[in-house]
Structure formats: C-alpha cells, structure tokens
Amino acid sequence: MADESQDIYYVQGIPVPETPLPGREPPAWKQTNVVGQRVPRVDAYERVSGSAVYPSDIHLPNMLYGAILRCPHAHARIRSVETVAASKMPGVRAVISGTTPEADRVWKKDAAGETRLFDPHCRFEGEAVAAVAAESPYQARDAINAIRVDYEVLPFVADERKALQAGSPVVHAKGNLSKTDTYERGDVAQGFAAADVVLDQSYRTECELHTPLEPHGCVANWEGRSLTVWESSQGVYAVQSKVAEVLKLPLARVRVIGHYMGGGFGSKLEAGKYTVIAALLAKQAARPVKLVLTREETFLAVGNRPPSNMTLKAGVKRDGALTALEFSCLGTGGAYPAGGTSLVDWLIRDLYTCPNVRTTCSDVFVHAGPARPFRAPGHPQGAWALEQMMDALAEAIGMDPVQLRLKNIPVFSQAREGNPAYTSTGFKECLEQGAAAFGWEKARRETGANAAQGPLRRGVGMAGGLWVAGGGRPPSTVIVKLFSDGSVNLNMGASDLGTGTKSVMAMVVAEELGVRPDAIQIENADTGTTQYATPSGGSKTVPTEAPAVRNAAVQVKQKLLEMAAEALKADLSELAYQGREIVSRRDSSQRIAVKDLDALKRQGVVVGVGYRGPNPKNKVVNPFAAQFCEVEVNTRTGELKILRFVAAHDSGRVMNRLTYDNQVFGGITMGIGLAMTEVRILDAGQTGKMVNRSWHDYKLPTALDVPADMLSIPIDPGDAEANNTGAKGLGEPVTIPTAAAIANAVYHATGLRITQTPIHPLQLVQRLAERRKEG
Amino acid sequence: MSSKNPQAGSDGVTRRRFLTSVGAGAIGVAATENLLAAGRETGESQVMPAGQASTVSLRINGEAHVVLAEPRWTLLHVLREIIGLTGAKPGCERGECGACTVLIDGVPRYACLTLAVEAQGREVTTLEGLLDGETLGPVQKAFAEADALQCGYCTPGQIMSVEGLLRANPDPSAEEIRRGVSGNLCRCGAYHHIFQAARRAAELKRGK
C-alpha cells in the first residue's frame, strides 16, 4: 500500500479564498479553482465495484423477509382477513393485519379524513391489507398467497374526467372534489379584446410513474425499544419523523440511515406504509426484517405524476406582446389529497410577461394510487400546454418562436405578492445561446413539413421553462472536521440521490481548504450521526447544503487563523493563508505551517459548524431553461425518432461540470418518456385496475430511444445574491421543457399538433390517416 | 449480441417433468441440460416440493460455492442473499430491467430469470468478478471516469452488459453499443455517458 498520509493539506497549491473575520459569512466566490471542474464522483469506486451498500443489499444476522398483501380491487371494503393458515406455513414468523392490535394504527389525518395503516376501506388497487415475515422471500410470498380476504367489492371511478359527474361513485364522504385553486391578475376579458390573435386549445398529459430502479423498501431492526431503519430514501429525517409519529416513539429512538439509494425522483421523499409495516413485523418476530416492494407494488402504490386535463386560451398582439392567458386544469392526486394539480399552472402565471392571467385548477379524487411529487411537479404538464401554445401563437403572427419568447421575458416574478425581482435570470441567454448552438434559424429553414418529399419528415422545436423553487433555503447544519494531518471529515444529513451531492460538497470543501478531494471522508444521511437536513428534492439540495458546507469550512479556517494568531502572537486581521502556511501580511517572516500548530495537535481536530443563512429578502431565486430538438417522423408508420437535443440551462454556478451534464441528459431522457412512451393505463370501464403494471407494458426510454447527439450549454449569470456559492437548482428544470419541445418539433415536421401525450406511433399514424381522409 | 433470456433446452426434457422438478415459481422459464441432470438426481417418480432444498454447486468469479438451495430459487437470490455478492441488483425480478445482469459462460444473462440450479456447471461472473483484487476492471474504470451513472443501481447490470459485449465484440460501433445495453433500463437517464464509457472501455481493454 502506498503512503498516502503525506501532503494532504494544500497539496494542490490552490490559493484558497480570503477568510472573513469570525462571525461573518463569506461573500460569493469571484472565481473558483476546484468548483466547476469535471470531477468524477467521490463515490464512483463504490458504485461501480459493487461495494456501495444500498438498503436492498443490507443483510443482518437472523434477518427475515417481509411481504405485503395488497387489495386487488379499485374500491372495496374488507369484511374479514383470515391469516391462520398463512401463519402456520413453513418459515413464517410474523403475520399482521388491521385486526392485529399493534398494527391497528392511524396512518394519516388530512382533509379527506383519517386513514389507517391497514385501512378496512380500500380506495385504490394496491392498498395494504396484511403483511408477513418469513425465513425467505419465497416463503413470505407463499404465505401472502395463503391469506384469505373477504372483500365487498364496491363501485369505483378511475377516470378523473368522470369523477364530478352526477351519480359517480364517491371516494370520500365529502365528495369527489378535493379542492379548486384560482389565481387572477389583471382582466383577461380586456386582454383578449386587445389581442390581434386569440387561440384556444385543450391539452392532456397522461399519468407517469416514477419507477426508480431500486424498489421502495427498507430493513428494520429493533435493539430493545430502539428502532433502526435502513431506507431507500431521499430524506432520512422525514422518514424518521413519520415512523416516530405512527409508532408513537420519541425521535431519539428511531434512527434512519440512507447512505445509498437507487433513485427516487420525488417518490421517496417520505416514509411509506411499508416502513412502518417492516418495523411492526420486526417487533412481532423480534428479528430484523427486510421489506423491499415488488416491482408491481411500485407501479400501484408509491406515487405517480398524475394526469392533467388542461385548456389554455391565449391572446397576443402582432408585435408578439402577450395580452392574456386563461388556463384551467382538471387533475387528480388519486384516492387521497396528494397535490393532483399542484403547480400545473405555475408557468402560465409566471414564465412570460403577461398583464392579464386567470387560472383555475380543480383537483378531484378517483379510486387510483395516490400521487407523489414527481420531478418538477406540475411543470412539465404546464409546459406541455403553454409551450405548444407559444409555438402556435408565433406561427399565427408570423414570428419566430424564439423571438416570441424573447419578446416576453420578465425580470421579476409577476405571480408572487409584491412582484419580487429574480436574483438572476439567464432566460434570455438560454434562448439566445441555445438557439445559436443548435443552429436554430438554419435548421428551421431546412426542415419542416414542406421542406421534404417522401415519408420521412424532419422538424425542429423548442421550449422554455423555469422552476418555481430551486433556490434552497434554511435550515441546514453541516459539520466540517479537520484532522491534525489536514484530512477532513464532512458530516451532513442530506441524501445523495445520484445527482452527485456528495461530490459537489467535497469540491466545496476542497475549494475552501485546499485539501485533496480524496482526503475528504463524507458521512451523510443518518439521523443518528449526521446533522439535520430536509429531504433532497425540489432541486434545492445544492443551493441549500453547499452554502452551509462552505460556511463550515470557512469556520475551520477562522479557527486555524485564531490558533496561528496565538502561536505567532500576531493580530488576527493581519494573517492570511499562503499555501500550506499561515503568514503575516505585515511581516512575512512571521509564518507557521497549519500542521505545526500546537493547538491543532493538542485538540486533535478543528470543528467548523456551518448553517444555511437566510435567502435574500424580497427576491426570488429560480432556475431557467430552454431546450431545442430535431426529430424525424415516418409518416407511413408513425414512428418518431429524436435526432438531437441542445439544452441551455441557467442553474447558476456549475458546481461539477461532469455531473451537471449527466443531470441535463437525464432530465431530457425522462422528458422523452413523458412525450413519447409513458402512460399509466387503468381499466376505467370494467375493473379500475392498472393494465400496464410492468416495464414491459409501461415503457421507459431505453438506450435506443435517446439521441446520440446531446449538448449541454450551462448559462451562469453570476448570481452573487442567491447564496454564497451562486448555485441554483438543476435536477428538475432539466425535464420541464423537453416534452413540449418534442411536440413542437413534431408539429414542424408534420403540421400535426399533438396535444395529448404520449406521441407514440399509434397516435401519430392515426392522426396522419385522419388528415389524409380529410384531404 | 446474443439474447439475455435463457435458451430453451432441446434434449428431450418434458415440460411437465420440468415444472414438477422446479415448482410453480418458475413457470415460463425453459429448461436446460443442467436442470435435466437435477431432475435425474431426484428420480423418475419423485416430485420435489418447491420448498425442499438440495445441494447446488456453483462456480462464481472463479470460486466454487456449494449451497443448499430450493429448486425455485433464482441465481440472483442465491448470489445476494445466500452467498453475499450484492453487486447484481434486483430491480424487477422478472426480466424487465437488467439490473441483475451477470455473465454466464461469458454471455450477459438476467440472474433473476436464471434458476440457481440452471447455473450449475457454468462459469458465473458478477460485477465483483471484474475486479482485480481491489483494482477496478477496465469497464468499471471507464464507467467511473465518464460518470456513466447517477443513482448507481442499474450500473452493475450496465457494466456487465458492456463487459459481455466487449468480450464478443472488442470494437463495437455506436449502434452496437446502444443495442448492447438496450436490455438495461436506467431511470436516471445516464445513457449518454454510458455510451461514452463503453467506447472508452473498449479502448482500455485494447490497451490504449
């Protein structure tokens, strides 16, 4: 083994940023040496070698395997559950259901009423009915199959478009309307009267399922009265609080660990019933229990991006000024209040300058699996409507679609109280630089419905977007601990979803302390040992955690300077870092190497604690985006091929260019899924059951569906106000404009406006045939 | 590249005998000659219950393992829960996602669609088997450098598919690479970097 103990601190000779006096936050970086580079992720070795331990990999001594029986009906009442036969089967060690006293618990109280952990009233296919733990997963499954349930099957409504019709079966006693949200500014009637062109169109996006590659699941282990849970989670503290609440335990007796997790996309922001069920099975058996959902269960019971039925009426003047936008949406969060129409109208309210806007969103209940936040909730749906409408408006007034958008760029948020300004907006640059890199005008001339003969038609399209959040916010606490040899331990509660959070944070420490990134040990996502963090979601992890990490590293530097001042008997304000030494600015013979500081050797470690400071007052921090694509449509078969994508994103400072580009391409890939392949199909007529509950029948984009030619263009407006790193969120904006850009390209290629996802060959070929018939 | 689905045996095993020997858990999986051998051991008239374990000898990453396994247990289950090699990941356990891809006699296969008894007499290579001690193999190294992953859960399967592809075809075209990993879903959408990693891995394997 090589000697790696030398030259850890300041080995790179990086000039570290100036250290502010104690108690002050550092200003935003002017330039960076490590941050922004292309750095392979710090845990790449673990992830490619198989040594990373995901929750599904945990294997504890004496461990059992859990499984859940789920309701096979869209709507049913349970008359009885018979578990005696199952409990006598080989290897079965625990069986619980709603009549097990310990498992008879309240799961949630919300606007719709109270739900129990094993609720006798099953309002969607996939609701939990009973659970077992056995010596092997096979025995657990055998036992599940041996449980007999007497269901009273009830009438259901699975199509949200029918849920408000008279005589529709009701999901909750209060009725099927969960809520209606309205928003209004200006006077849309006046706006439409002032317009030169008014267009009106309906749109629909289908329900999408998250299906991360690692199924939802956990391992639960009791040590007496204390519970430890290894959970595939985006936020260990959120899981801890939910589990403690349902089990009525103090937080300190529930430890949740989630070092690695195999994808979430919003569906793992909270604890699932399965987490509590695993804990209860483990309690009954007095043994650890691993409970990982089957793939089918993840289709049914752990969230979705719900369908949206939208109409948009828009008015524009000949010069491209928008005069009015009127939007309505009917959506559903499924069987429980779950944000069915949440943020669907946000882009209509706030992406473009428009004085007169009215939106109405009605969220209804249906007998289907509850929604969960899904990467940029509401936004890709809203973009599907708004960005296709912008395309149509541009054509109607004979203006280039990019120019129409450039004409309507706001510098402040119109939809928020008091119209606060954005700390930065690079939307204009996203549009201009994206268009330039794509060769937009030339490509638009050379492709299009009339530019070719024969069955293959090419077209180009684009769309813009912003993400309502992405600025991050307090709270967050991070600890940076410098060992006496200069190596570092970084302690933070945030999960790394695969976005590269750990790598970005190591780069922030390296930037401030000049320490080698590989000499930084990272401890994260453990409620027992790491500091408080909110779940990783909302594209807020980097802008929330990175400033706290930076503050913690800066505090380490401040403490070292104080130690040097004492050692050199110098004034703190005259000392500065120079390579691996601290030197007096007044007398350069006054110097001491950091590692020679007696106080550091005595103390063993120097600990810096960083907090996330407040966001700027009366300002909004939002990321912006523009994406461009070229497609080819086979007008005989309806096949659609994406040829290339250019994505220009203003997410503030690029923290790690390598993981940044990866996120951008990943967001486009997911957007391709929304546009072209993904649709949850419910048998709304006869059974209400999900028809396509597998990846064979529910299609994700594969390696064959993404274009070989993808280009990421980061736009950094140099945001010194957002936070002390200048970074804004990236993970969600990257998937907002994609589907709409594809639809616009299909329109350009064929002249067909496809307003309903997914644009698959079946739909396209049908539309093409209809048009031929119409002549 | 050859199919990842186990090939049907052609040496006369009847469907009925196959099913009784492996239990109901394996309906839909075709027989192999190994299974036939397992069937013979149990005798003509004996029907082996699904839950009854028997000795299975496996060769994994060059090492011999003898385990007591039920006939219905998948290779994936035995690798992960019995032997403790957790590189291969369960993403669906029904042949949809490819996260459990391993090499069987050098060819990528879904370990969730392969019964442990079927793998007897074959050389099984898992992600861990690509390491030289603790040093990453060329495909693993290329994946790390190109950042060909996000959450990392599909990554073991992607790496094994690329490894299998490069063993059969050391210098694949871009299209061949896409087809080579088309049986491996990546929900994070890291495909673009995976293609780059596969190209780089081919170079590394050729000593460039």
Image (cartoon, coloured by chain):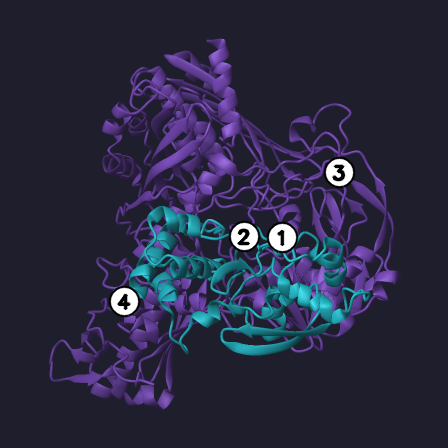
* Mark 1 or 2, closer to the camera: 2
**Crowding near pointer 4: few (<14 within 10 Å), some, many (20+)?**
few
**Crowding near pointer 1: few (<14 within 10 Å), some, many (20+)?**
many
Quadrant of the rendered image containing residue A501? bottom left
A237 displayed left or right of A15: right
Give, as a three-letter code, the residue at label 2: Cys
A140 displayed left or right of B79: right
**Crowding near pointer 2: few (<14 within 10 Å), some, many (20+)?**
many
Give, as a three-letter code, the residue at label 4: Gly
Task: Provide the residue designation for mark 4.
Answer: B207
Give, as a three-letter code, the residue at label 1: Arg
What shade has chain B been given?
A: cyan
- Label 1 to label 2, Cα distance in Å? 10 Å
Q: Are marks 3 and 1 on the same chain?
A: yes
Which chain's residue wears label 2?
Answer: B
- Label 3 to label 2, Cα distance in Å? 37 Å
- Looking at the picture, tell me which residue is in the foreground, A243 or B36: B36
Q: Are marks 4 and 1 on the same chain?
A: no
Give x and y (percent) for residue A753.
Answer: 45, 22
Who comes first in sequence, dot 3 or dot 1? 3
Residue drawn at x 49%, y 57% as measured from the top left = B154
Give, as a three-letter code, the residue at label 3: His
Task: Provide the residue designation for mark 2.
Answer: B97
